[in-house]
Amino acid sequence: MDVPPRPAIHRLYRFQWEPAQQAHVLLYPEGMVKLNQSAGEILKRCDGTHSVAEIVADLEATFNASGLTADVETFLTMAEAQNWIVWNPA
């Protein structure tokens, strides 16, 4: 049985809450990316141990929402293109 890959923050970035910005940020040697709330909540769950389906399920439960799969997948595609995340094999 194939186990889906699991997104993780790229090792060149540090994900953290930045009180001065009142937002989650990605820090890297050349600067900082300030994330909106949705991006922060998704990336907070990208620890390399959870599949996209598990991340979506957690977000939907946390925010009492449904139908977030397409939005999360779209964001993760963009995050991968920006090299913010890598995909860990199971």
Image (spheres, rainbow, N blue to C red):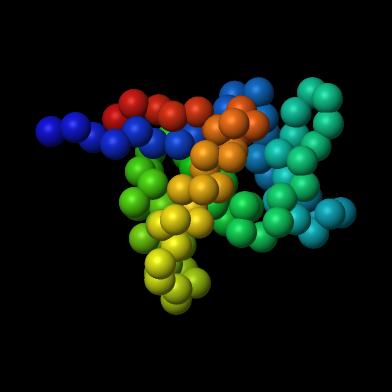
Estimate the x, y position of residue 7 in percent, counting from the top left: 45, 36
Res. 45 in view: no
Using residue 7 as the reference point, say whether residue 20 is left or right of it: right
Res. 48 in view: yes
Asked if residue 62 is positioned above or below residue 15 in the image, the reply reads: below
Asked if residue 39 is positioned above or below residue 12 in the image, the reply reads: below
In-front residue for pair 80/35: 80
Residue 85, located in which quarter of the rendered image?
top right
Using residue 87 as the reference point, say whether residue 78 is left or right of it: right
Using residue 49 as the reference point, say whether residue 86 is left or right of it: right
Using residue 53 as the reference point, say whether residue 45 is left or right of it: right
Residue 68, located in which quarter of the rendered image?
bottom left
Residue name at image x 75 percent, y 28 percent: 28
> Where, quadrant-wise, is the N terminus in this rendering?
top left
Estimate the x, y position of residue 60 in percent, counting from the top left: 42, 67
Residue name at image x 46 percent, y 69 percent: 62
